[in-house]
Amino acid sequence: MPEINNYYSNNMNTTSRRSAILKFGALIAGAGTVPDLIGKELDDVRILPGYAGNTSPVSRPLTAIVIGAGNRGNVYAGYALKYPDELKIVGVAEPIEHKNERFAKAHGIPDENRFPSWEYVFQRPKFADAVIITTPDNLHYGPAMKALPLGYNMILEKVVAQSWKECNDILQAAVKFNSIVAVCHVLRYTAYFRKLKELVSTGFFGDILSVQHMEPVGHIHMSHSFVRGPWRNSKESNPMILSKSCHDTDILRWLIDKPCKKVSSFGELSLFRKENAPAGSPLRCTDGCPVEAHCPYSALKVYQKNRWYLGHLNLVNETDEEILEKLKTTRYGICVYKMDNDVVDHQICNFEFEGGITAAFSMEAMTPYGGRRTRIMGTKGHTVGDESDLECFNLETGESLKWNVNQAEITSGHGGGDYGLVHDFVRASLNHDPSLLTSTVQASMESHLMGFMAEKSRLADGKSMDIKM
Ligand SMILES: NC(=O)c1ccc[n+]([C@@H]2O[C@H](COP(=O)([O-])OP(=O)(O)OC[C@H]3O[C@@H](n4cnc5c(N)ncnc54)[C@H](O)[C@@H]3O)[C@@H](O)[C@H]2O)c1
């Protein structure tokens, strides 16, 4: 057991995880209760399957229309290709021609159900059970508010909308029209966070008193998504505490399971600013930048050499020439210090929950690693985790429990959360039973409000803000 004080260090990095996995080999999947696990060696531990929800067979495939056939739209629709007995995609709205065409071909969508924009879908009478809204953040509200009165159920990407009022409108419409709305807080469906939630719910830690939670974004991820990419500007999308960290406020709210009462927050955009541009650097990395060879954020390195994050470049063939052309003509080739970004690269929030429970959250962008770090201190137990390993201590008995995510069956991105969400949505929707989902819009709203109020506090020099639903 590593020193718990070192948990932000490399104790739980990929290499050590890998060697732990190799050392302990394949683990047995099966049901188990928390008390059974205490004090057992890792290779004795029996684990729960990835999805703790209802795994019953479905009577027919749920039908759905994808609105926005980009990265996320293709991820969720991938479930239909893998499990055609459960989900069938029958329509698509996507303005980029080649994306629309490829998507329609992959799912066998007839021409009459292909649309160049979301508005056209709702000019037709309802023709599917559900819509999957995976458009950019500023295009969630419009389609959601049209779909709900027509009686569609909905998978709705986070961030739900761009203001608390818009989020609340969607919530009210979902209630009024009795629709099932799953917000894509996919971490709730991961094996790791389900295991953590199960430990909390079964009383392993006693009553939670305090939580420390950190989101290390990763420096290249930051430079793509939050400096050059879709979430760089809070007016076009949302502030960082929502666009990146609504998952984290949601996980805190879910684990603590009490209303959040107050927040104060500080944070800045410090690195990716014009005054930090290297001397002599041109606007674009392709224009003969003198530091390009040493710059970790060089667009040539990120996109052309390493071919990372190409999804947002909307490429047809992904050839070197096509990528270079995009770097010369789109914002993805612009120097990271010369963009129109305004979202923060570090932010801290202090939350107070009902009953005096406290939670401290940090978002840190420039990290060479990912994997959210969480410590929970309860009256009877303690844990440290990094989205892969959990190490728990029982303060009363002195016994310990180790758990590794590789003990669970993972079948999709976000630690199994992406397909976990669709799996539960299909069942909730076909049975019209929202209790089969954990991230209904009702359950997700308060954590969005925590984000909106945290941002308000940050902009008010950290003034403490009351949170009232
Ligand atoms: N749950 C998560 O963990 C997670 C992760 C990443 C992104 N997201 C969210 O998912 C959403 C989509 O992100 P993405 O990375 O897939 O972006 P993306 O750009 O890859 O996909 C969005 C798609 O919407 C299309 N679109 C634009 N205007 C449209 C219109 N008028 N009608 C229909 N389609 C339109 C775009 O052409 C694009 O193909 C965002 O809200 C984002 O915040 C969630």
Image: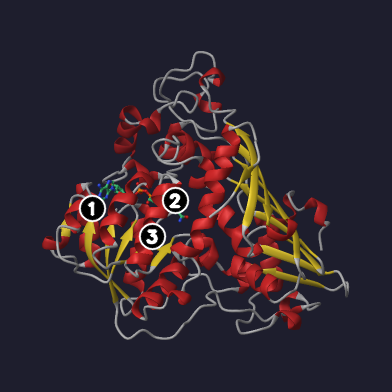
* Residue on which the image places disc 3: 172
Drawn side of residue 23 relative to residue 418, left or right: right
Residue kind at label 1, given as amino acid type: Trp
Give how far across and how far down residue 262 sits, in percent.
65, 48
Residue kind at label 2, given as amino acid type: Val
Residue 287 quadrant: top left
Number of the label disc, if any, that sits on residue 118 = 1
Q: Secondary structure at mark 1?
A: helix
How far apart marks 3 and 1 lie (CA) works out to: 21 Å
Number of dots carrying numbers: 3
Number of the label disc, if any, that sits on residue 159 = 2
Badge 2: residue crowd in 10 Å (few <14, some 14–19, many ≥20)? many
CB contact under 8 Å: marks 3 and 1: no
Residue at (30% x, 55% y) in the render: 145
Mark 3 vs mark 2: give the one in front.
3
Give how far across and how far down residue 349 sits, in percent.
65, 44
| Camera-nearest residue between 116 and 1 | 116
Drawn side of residue 213 relative to residue 97, left or right: right
Residue kind at label 3, given as amino acid type: Gln
Q: Secondary structure at mark 2?
A: loop
Q: Secondary structure at mark 3?
A: helix
Give how far across and how far down residue 42 sits, in percent.
74, 74
